[in-house]
Amino acid sequence: SWLVTGATAAGTRPVRWDVPFIGRHSERAILDAAVDLVRAGHSGVVSIVGEAGSGKTRLADEVVERVTGEAIVLSTACAPYGEPSVWTPVVTALTNLFDIDPEGPSEQARLAVEARADELWGLSPGAPEMERFLSAIAYLLGHPSDLDRLDAAGARDVVAGAIADMMRRHAQTRMTVLWVDNLQWAEPMLRDLLAVVVRSLADLPFLLVTAQRPDDDLVWPPPLLDRPLLLRVPLGPLGRSDAVALVQAIAERDEPDATLSDEACAGLVDRGGGNPLFLVELAAMAAQCADAAELPGTLRALIAARLDQLPTPLRAIVDNAAVLGASDYVDALDAFATGMGQDFQPADLDELVSLGLLEVEGRWWRFRSDVVREVAYQTLTKRVRAQRHAGTAKFLGTKRPHQVEELAHHAAAAAELVAELGRVEGVPSDITERAVDALLAAARGALETGRFDDANRLVGRGLDLHPTSATTERELLLVRSSSELDQRDTASARADADRVLEGAMTDADLVHEGEARIRLGTVGRMEGNLDVGRVELDRAVELFRELGDRPRLAQALRARGFSEVFGGTLSVAKEYIDQALVMFKELDDERGHAWAHHDLAWVAFMTGDFTDAELQMEDAAQRFEALGDRVGVHWAQGLKAFVLYFQRRFDEAEELATVLEAEARRWGDTWARLMMVSLLSNLRLWTGRVAEAEQFGERALAGFREIGDRFGMTQALASLNRARAALGKVAEVRRGAEEAIALGRTFGELVLGWQGAAGVAMHLGDAEQALNLIDQVLERHRAAGSSDAEATVVRALALCQLQRAEEAMEAIVAIDVDDFPFARSARALVMAMAGDPIDAVTDAEIVEKERGASYFDIAIARLAGVVAATRSGDEAGRQQWAERFAALASTVGDVVLVTIAQAIAEPDTDRAEPALATGWLRILDT
C-alpha cells in the first residue's frame, strides 16, 4: 500500500538532481506559498494530480527539498496492491527514523526510540505517553506488547491513535511535512488514517502533500477536512518552450560536446507530447540512436526498449522486483533471486539506482517510477508471471506467514493465470485451493480491522476463482455479508446471506444456516422489518441451542435481544440480552460482555430508567477501554451524551456531544458524527436557540438521507420539525411531520416519529391532530414497555387546548412531576384551568428555578401563571406573568409564543382565526 522511506530533519528520499527541473513556474509558486503558510503555523493539504510521467513526484520533491533542515519530513509511496501488513509503511518509517533493526531484540528497539524521544516528541523515558508509544511500536515490530491482549480491531484503533499522536508531537516540535506519492493506489483505510492525522494536526504547522493520477473514484482530499489550506494542483503537459529547454538540457548532460539541432529537438518535443518523463527518456535514448525515426513512439514502448538493453543480471532484478510490487525489503530481492536460481549482487542493485530505475533507502528498495514497474511486469510472459507469483507465495508462506494479505495476492495472481493458461510447470496443482484459503484468511483479517472495502474485494477475488469447496464459498459469503452490514449495505448483505442459507440448507449445514439467519435477522432489524428479523433470529437461536455451540448462541441471543430495542418489546429485549451476558461471562468473552452491557444500557434508556442506563453504559465503556476498542468506547460515550440530555444536564451533554462529534469527524465515522449533530440540534432547541437547532437538524437529516439510515432520519426530523414549528415554517413542518410518521410505520412499535409529530402538532396548537397521534403513541408505548411519561404530558396539553381540563387532570396526576419540569409545567396549566390557582402558581414558580427546564417548559409555566392570575382576578399578578412570558417569547423568537403573547396583551381585540396557536388561544378563552 504505501512505503514510508524514512523521517529525518533533512528528508531522506533521493532525488535525481542530474535531471534539471524545468517549467511548472506557476505550480511551484503556489506550492511555495503553501509552504510559507504552513511555516507561519497553519496546517494544509496539497494534492498534485497528473498522468504518469507528468512530473508529480519531481515537483513535490522540489517543494520538500525547500524545507530541508528545518522540518521533519516523512516521504511515502503507495503500491498497486496491498502491503504485507496494513502497518508495513509505519514499520518502515520507524525503522528508518530510529535506526531500528526489525529483526533485532525488543530492548534494542526500546533504547533506540528512547534515545530520540525527547528530540522528536519532547518526552522522557518513563512518561505515560512515552510508554503508550513504546507499546504501539513494539506491537508493530512484532515484539511482546500490552496490545497483544487486544483483538485486531482494538489493536488497530490503539495503533492508529498512537500514530496520530506521534505525528502531533512531531508537529509540536517543529514544522512537519508528510509527502505521499501514488495515492491512487492507497487502501481506503490508509487514506482514512491520513485524514485522521490531518484532522488531528489542524492547529499545528503540518503539511500533507499527495500526488496521484486522475481517478474519478478517488475522492481526495476527503470532505470534512476543513483545513485553512486545501489545494488541488493539476499538472498538464509542459509548454513547448519548457519542453524544448528540457530536451536540450538532457542532450547537453549526456553529450556535452555535441549539439542537438533545432530540427531534431523539435522532433523529440513533438513526439514527447509535453510529458516530462517521456521527453527525458527520448532525449537520453536519442543520444545513442543514429536515426530518430527508430525511437519508440510511446513512453511505455521506450521504457520497454530501455529495459531490453539491460544486462541479464540487472534485468532479472527488475523483473523480480516487478513481481514483488512497487517496493519491499532488499533482502526480499536476494531471497527471490535465490529461489529462482539467480545470483544477486548488491553492486547490480547499485547500478539500477544509478540508472534511475530503482531507489534504495536503508533496508528498502522502490521503483523510481511506477511506469517502469508496470512495463517490466507486462513484458513478462504469463507463464513466467504465474511461476514467480507462485514462488513468492511459497516463500511468504514459509518465511513470512504473518503477511497474509500479500501471500493471498501472489497465490491468487498465480491461480488466476493458471485458470487462463491451464497447467503451468512449477506452479502447484492445488494453487487455486491455496489461493482461496489465503484470500479467506486475508478477508477475515480485513473485516476484523474494519477495512470493509478490502474485505469485500478479497472475497470477490476468492469467489471469482470458483472454490471447489461449497463450505469455503459460504465462509467467503458470510465474511462479505458481515462487512456489508457494517457498511449499512443491507441489500447486498441480504443477497449474500440468502446464498449462504440456500446452500447450507441443501447441504444440511446447520452452523452456516444459523450464521446466515443471524445476518438476515440483522438486516430485518436495520430495515425496520421486525417480524422478519424475529423469525430469522429465533431460528438461529434454536439452531445453536441444538448444536450446543455456546459462542454462536451468545451472539445470536444478543442479536435477538437488540432487535427488540427499536420498535419491539423492551422486556423481551432484556431477557435475551441478559441470557447472552451470562454466556459471555462464562465464555470469558470480554468484547461480547461489553456489547451486552451496551445493549442493556439502550434497553434502560428506552424504558426511561436513566440511572440504570448510565450504570450499564459506564460498565460497557470501561470494558471497551480495556480492550482498546475505540468504536465501542465512542458508542458508549454517545449513549451517555443522550442520557445526560434526557436527564436535562444540558451543559454536560453539549460538552460531551461536541467532543464526540469532533472525534467522529476526526476518524471519519459518519453515523456517529450525525448522531451527535442530531443531539446538538435538540440541545440548541430546548435551550432556546431555535435557528441554530434548525441548522443542526438540517445537517443531520441530509447526512442520514445520504447514508440511507431511516432511524437517523426519524431522529433528525424530531428536532428539525420542532425548530421549524417555533420559527413558524408551517408548510415545511407539516411535510416533515408526514415524513416522520411514514418512517415510523417502518419500525414496528417504535414511537419516535409519531411522538415527534404529535409534539409538533401540540406546539402549533393543532389539538385534534396532536391528540389523535398521541393516543396511537401511547398504545405503542404500552406494547413496547417503553416510558410513556412524556407522551402523557403531550396528551394532557392537547386536552387543555381542547378545553377538556378534567380529562387533562386525569392524565397528568398519573405522572411523577418531581425533577420533570415538562410535566410540572403542564400540571400547573391544568390546575390553573381547573380552578386551583394557588397550586398552579406554586408549580409554575418551581419550574422557573428547576435545573434543566427548557424554554418551552418555562413558557408553559408562565402561561399557567397568566391563566391562574386571570381566573383569580389578580390583575397585577397577571401583568407580571404576561411580561415574563412576552420577554421569553421575544428572546427565543418562537413565533407561536409571540402569537400567544400578543393575545395575552390584547385580550379584547377581535382577531381572525390565526394560522398558529389555535389551541393555545382556546386556553386563554377559558
Image (cartoon, rainbow, N blue to C red):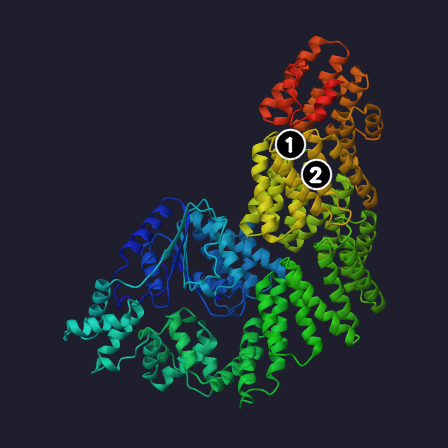
**SS class of the residue under badge 2?**
helix
Sort mark 2 into few (<14), some (14-19) or many (20+) by Cα contacts within 10 Å: many
> Residue at image x 77%, y 44%?
604
Residue labelled with disc 1: 686
Between the residue at mark 2 and the residue at mark 1, the CA separation in whole angstroms equals 14 Å
The quarter of the image holding the C terminus is top right
Q: Which mark is residue 269?
A: none
Location of residue 324 with respect to 66 vertically, above or below: below
* Residue 425 shown left or right of residue 717 in the figure: left
Mark 2 or 1, nearer chain start: 1
- Between marks 2 and 1 in the image, the one whose residue lies nearer the viewer: 2
Q: Amino acid at mark 2?
A: Gly
Compared across the picture, whether 308 is left or right of 422 comes to left
Nearer-the-camera pick, 832 or 607: 832
Q: Nearer the viewer, residue 406 or 811?
A: 811
Name the residue: 57% across, 47% down: 663
Say which of 441 and 837 sits in front: 837
Establish if 121 lies above or below 429. above
Relative to residue 878, is residue 85 depicted above or below? below
Left or right for 86, reference 93: right
Residue 166 sits above or below residue 326 on the image: above
Place of residue 791 in the rendered image (x, y in percent of width and height, measured from the top left): 77, 35
Residue 228 in percent (x, y) is at 42, 45
**Are there few (<14), some (14-19), or many (20+) residues within 10 Å of tag 1?**
many
- Report how many numbered discs are placed on residues in the image: 2
Residue 117 picture location, percent across and down:
47, 54
Identify the residue position indicated by label 2 in the image. 756
